[in-house]
């Protein structure tokens, strides 16, 4: 098999623009859009639409490397089945089950000579992640590139070709699963306000596993512990959004719900160190 450029294709804005940029430089016929399809319960319809819109524009099919039960499995359910939220060196287990393990299997079966180049959508704000990913893939013998680090004039943006990234970006900064197990409390406030079904599923998951998904200063903090605060915020008119930086978001929330001022300071400190993006 000749060399292909394998886009680690999450269906988000960055991976879509990576696909467009690489196809422009190397030709669509040399691009593979490698996606791990996720249950529509947690992956929004506009994300699935964006994936297909970009594939249609490039004139190529999406290649899937899926969890065996992808159509019914959720991040919470695979963790509950395993009896843990994390695996190995503290990595969230759902990413391993739904994305990493199928990805590794696909590479072993489809790129045994390690000829392909693997394309990631990490950008200039994520240079430490770029380094980690390049080193991890390099240690396994795979080559990587990061088109979001290219000069701006060679990156193809969605707006350049008239493709809408979707309504998810009106509220969220990323097209992660709704109820991302890596996300901070700002994300989970949105889930509390807009997706009570996922909130309840995750609460039940915490009960089943016996541990919380969030830790603060070495202490477990459960979703149930935040319900009184989040309801007060909702009633006070705190808008559920990630489009405001976390420092500003929690500062505004403090003003609206002053009785919880110290607790909101703690939440802001927690979110400062939380990764909000699931990576392929």
Image (cartoon, rainbow, N blue to C red):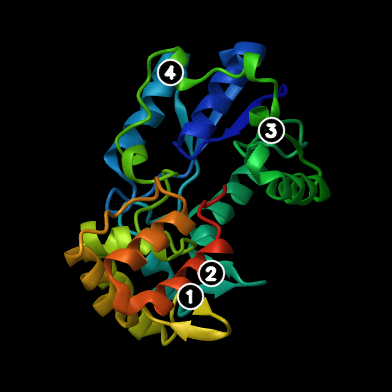
Q: What's the CA distance linking mark 2 and mark 3?
A: 30 Å
Q: What's the CA distance linking mark 1 and mark 2?
A: 5 Å
Say left or right for 13 vs 225.
right
Q: Are marks 1 and 2 in contact (CB under 8 Å)?
A: yes
x and y percent of residue 3 in the render? Answer: 72, 24
The residue to which callout 2 is attached is: 269
The residue to which callout 1 is attached is: 266
Helix, strand or loop at label 3? It is: loop
Say left or right for 120 vs 132.
left
The answer to which of 24 and 60 lies nearer the viewer is 24
Mark 2 surroundings: few (<14), some (14-19) or many (≥20) residues within 10 A: some
Q: Earlier in the sequence, mark 4 or mark 2?
A: 4
Mark in front: 4 vs 2: 2
Q: What's the CA distance linking mark 4 and mark 2?
A: 35 Å
Q: Is residue 260 above or below residue 274?
A: below
Helix, strand or loop at label 4? It is: helix
x and y percent of residue 57 in the render? Answer: 42, 15
Helix, strand or loop at label 1? It is: helix
Residue 159's label in the rendered image is 4
Q: Earlier in the sequence, mark 2 or mark 3?
A: 3
Q: Earlier in the sequence, mark 4 or mark 1?
A: 4
Q: How many discs appear?
A: 4
Q: What's the CA distance linking mark 4 and mark 1?
A: 38 Å
Tell me which residue sits at (40%, 57%) in the image: 249
Q: Are marks 2 and 3 in contact (CB under 8 Å)?
A: no
Tell me which residue sits at (41%, 48%) in the image: 244
The residue to which callout 3 is attached is: 146
Q: Are marks 4 and 2 in contact (CB under 8 Å)?
A: no
Residue 195 in view (yes/no) = no
Mark in front: 3 vs 1: 1
């Amino acid at each position: 098999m000749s060399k292909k450029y394998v886009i680690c294709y999450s269906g988000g804005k960055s991976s879509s623009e990576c696909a467009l940029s690489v196809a422009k430089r190397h030709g669509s016929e040399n691009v593979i859009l490698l996606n791990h399809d996720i249950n529509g319960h947690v992956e929004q319809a506009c994300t699935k639409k964006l994936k297909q819109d970009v594939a249609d524009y490039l004139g190529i099919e999406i290649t899937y490397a899926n969890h065996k039960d992808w159509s019914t499995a959720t991040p919470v359910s695979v963790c509950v089945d395993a009896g843990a939220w994390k695996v190995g060196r503290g990595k969230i287990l759902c990413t391993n089950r739904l994305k990493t393990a199928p990805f590794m299997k696909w590479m072993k079966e489809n790129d045994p000579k390690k000829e392909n180049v693997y394309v990631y959508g990490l950008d200039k704000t994520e240079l430490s992640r770029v380094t980690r990913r390049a080193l991890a893939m390099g240690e396994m013998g795979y080559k990587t590139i990061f088109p979001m680090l290219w000069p701006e004039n060679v990156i193809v943006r969605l707006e350049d070709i008239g493709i809408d990234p979707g309504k998810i970006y009106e509220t969220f900064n990323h097209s992660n699963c709704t109820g991302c197990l890596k996300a901070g409390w700002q994300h989970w406030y949105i889930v509390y306000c807009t997706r009570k079904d996922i909130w309840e599923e995750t609460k039940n998951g915490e009960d089943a596993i016996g541990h919380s998904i969030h830790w603060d200063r070495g202490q477990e903090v459960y979703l149930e512990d935040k319900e009184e605060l989040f309801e007060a915020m909702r009633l006070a008119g705190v808008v559920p959004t990630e489009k405001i930086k976390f420092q500003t978001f929690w500062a505004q929330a403090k003003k609206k719900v002053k009785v919880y001022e110290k607790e909101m300071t703690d939440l802001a400190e927690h979110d400062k160190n939380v990764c909000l993006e699931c990576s392929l």
